[in-house]
Amino acid sequence: MQQAVNRYYETQIKTATPEELTLMLYNGCIRFLKQALIGVENKDFMSKNTNITKAVDIIDELQATLDMNYDISTNLASLYEYFKQRLIFASIKLDLDALQEVIGMVTDLRDAWNEAMKTVKHK
């Protein structure tokens, strides 16, 4: 069963547009951050560390794909750096508020990206 699920995800990634891949990255980041939050709440520090690391890896990937020829890319790069700083703080201090803050901000970015994709599709 797990092999079938893995094949499904692999096909989904291979056939996705760059815009859809970005949306998947945002969704994955949010999922890992929520799992890290649960890890902190349950004092499962291994889970917290693993999931914050995965979220930071996704943020690094989002940052690496920015086209710096646009002003918004500079703003997003700064925002991604802020996320990483807050996640390091959250990891060290076990700060739920910092995790919640980043979850909220990444969710807002994801929602805005999703709306932009819908707008472009309808043109």
Image: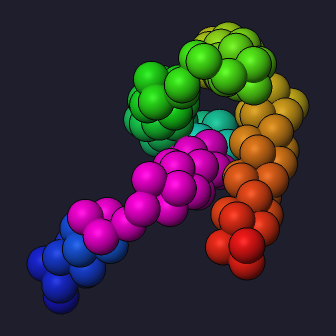
Residue 68 locus on image (x, y percent): 58, 17
Please tell me how many numbered marks the rendered image carries.
0
Q: In this view, does 43 lie to the left or right of 62?
A: right
Instruction: Please say whether residue 17 is one of the residues in the magenta stretch.
Output: yes
Residue at horizontal 76 percent and vertical 34 percent from the top: 102
Q: In this view, does 39 lie to the left or right of 93?
A: left
Residue at horizontal 84 percent and vertical 34 percent from the top: 101
* Position of 118 relative to 75 (above/below): below
Nearest the camera: 91 or 104?
104
Q: Quadrant of the C terminus?
A: bottom right
Residue at horizontal 65 percent and vertical 37 percent from the top: 40
Residue stretch in magenta? 13-34
Q: In this view, does 104 lie to the left or right of 103?
A: right
Nearest the camera: 53 or 79?
79
Instruction: Please say whether residue 19 is one of the residues in the magenta stretch.
Output: yes
Residue 75 locus on image (x, y percent): 76, 19
* Position of 81 relative to 9 (above/below): above
Residue at horizontal 80 percent and vertical 53 percent from the top: 112
User: Can residue 85 be seen here?
Assistant: yes
Residue 109 locus on image (x, y percent): 76, 45
Residue 20 locus on image (x, y percent): 50, 62
